Image (cartoon, grey):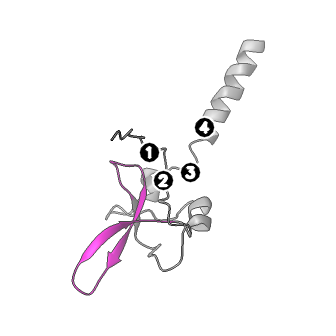
Amino acid sequence: MKSSIWVMVTAGALLAGCTDMPTQTNITESGFIRELPEGVLTLAATNQNLNAVRIDQATGCYEYEYRGPVETTFLPLRSDAGNPICSRAQDVVAVTG
């Protein structure tokens, strides 16, 4: 009895932790996220295109489409402090001098 309750609680906690990740149904045909998670909207600095955001598969960080006068490119979605907003922790690389 105790083990089945533990399994249900653990499964519920694991599923609840996945709610911030965009699902396939939340992705447009062009690869942009239809509806950003509330946490991302709260963190994102102004003057960024929140209508064209995707997750960089290599880093796990959000990036937005920037349409400049010469070219269109993707830039990291950043907070007011200038930090990138990521959907998973980035790998830390030790640099020695």
Q: Nearer the viewer, mark 3 or mark 4?
A: 3
- Determine whether, in the image, residue 90 is placed left or right of residue 38: left
Residue, disc 2: 86
Q: Position of residue 37 (x, y in %)?
A: 57, 59
Q: Position of residue 52 (x, y in %)?
A: 40, 71
Helix, strand or loop for disc 1: loop
- Determine whether, in the image, residue 70 is placed left or right of residue 77: left
- Is 66 located above or below residue 29 in the figure? below
* Callout 4 crowding tier (Cα within 10 Å): few <14, some 14–19, many ≥20: few
- The residues tagged by marks 1 and 2 sit, at their Cα atoms, a distance apart of 8 Å
User: From this viewpoint, which residue is outermost toward the bottom?
Assistant: 69
Residue, disc 3: 20
- The residues tagged by marks 3 and 4 sit, at their Cα atoms, a distance apart of 10 Å
Q: Hey, what amino acid is under mark 4?
A: Leu
Q: Nearer the viewer, mark 1 or mark 2?
A: 1
- Give the quadrant of the C terminus: top left
| Residue at 42% in and 41% down | 92
